[in-house]
Image (tube, rainbow, N blue to C red):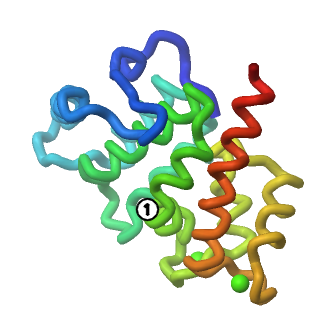
Amino acid sequence: MKLKKETVLHYLDFDSVYCLLSLRNAKILADYFKLLDVHNKNRMNDIQFYHFMNHVTDLKKKEIMMTFNMLDWNASGEIGFEQFYMLVCILLCSEYNVEKNFISRHSRPVFELLDMDGGRSISPAEFQASGFLFNLKGHALSKIFYEFDVSGDEYLNYKEFKMFAMACIDMQEETQKQRK
Ligand SMILES: [Ca+2]
Ligand SMILES: [Ca+2]
């Protein structure tokens, strides 16, 4: 996943260590969310979401809709600002190549995001399907999965996922070294 050039998101001041926006910038994003929220419901539906994502990212329709379904975990057909905020932080992480930082800093919300069926564990299919959000691909993904599935039941529970999230700190440092 990549952000398109010169989107509104590029004007936000992003803390790439904590993978969060400053309070002031979170407020700016909240105002932006209100602008997109043409129905004045404090919510965003899948169509609005599609247009926003299509405008700022290179994701295909299928991936955009999958992202929406992940964020809309209770299948209400809408997402709120909290989910939108998290999504924007993930988008900015991919822009600054700190996706793994995000996973390590926010392991609980990421776990819940990836656990699409809400079964409190991540299946290989869920892990594979959501890899595009964090720019984790194919072979590397399944290698990671089986490395951290310590119990060998072909699911990552939160404890196992947390170990992966912690290992992400080292993986992030590796990535940064390679980029230098
Ligand atoms: Ca699951
Ligand atoms: Ca397991």
Q: Is residue 114 visible?
A: yes
Q: Quadrant of residue 139?
A: bottom right
Task: Please report the residue visible at 58 percent of the width from the left and 33 percent of the height from the top.
Answer: 94
**Residue type at mark 1?**
Pro
Quarter of the figure with the C terminus: top right
User: Residue 66 location in percent, x, y?
Assistant: 55, 54
Say if 162 sits above or below 70 in the image.
below
Query: Which residue matches tag 1?
Result: 109
Say if 103 sits above or below 27 in the image.
below
Check disc 1 and report its element: helix, strand or loop.
helix
Say if 121 sits above or below 17 in the image.
below
User: Residue 87 location in percent, x, y?
Assistant: 42, 44
The one nearer the camera, 44 or 177, is 177
Tell whether circle 1 marks a residue whose Cβ is less than 8 angstroms from ligand 1: no
Q: Quadrant of residue 21?
A: top left
Quarter of the figure with the N terminus: top right
Farthest-out residue, left: 40
Say if 64 sits above or below 2 in the image.
below
Farthest-out residue, top: 6
Q: Is residue 66 visible?
A: no
Q: Is residue 169 left or right of residue 175?
A: left
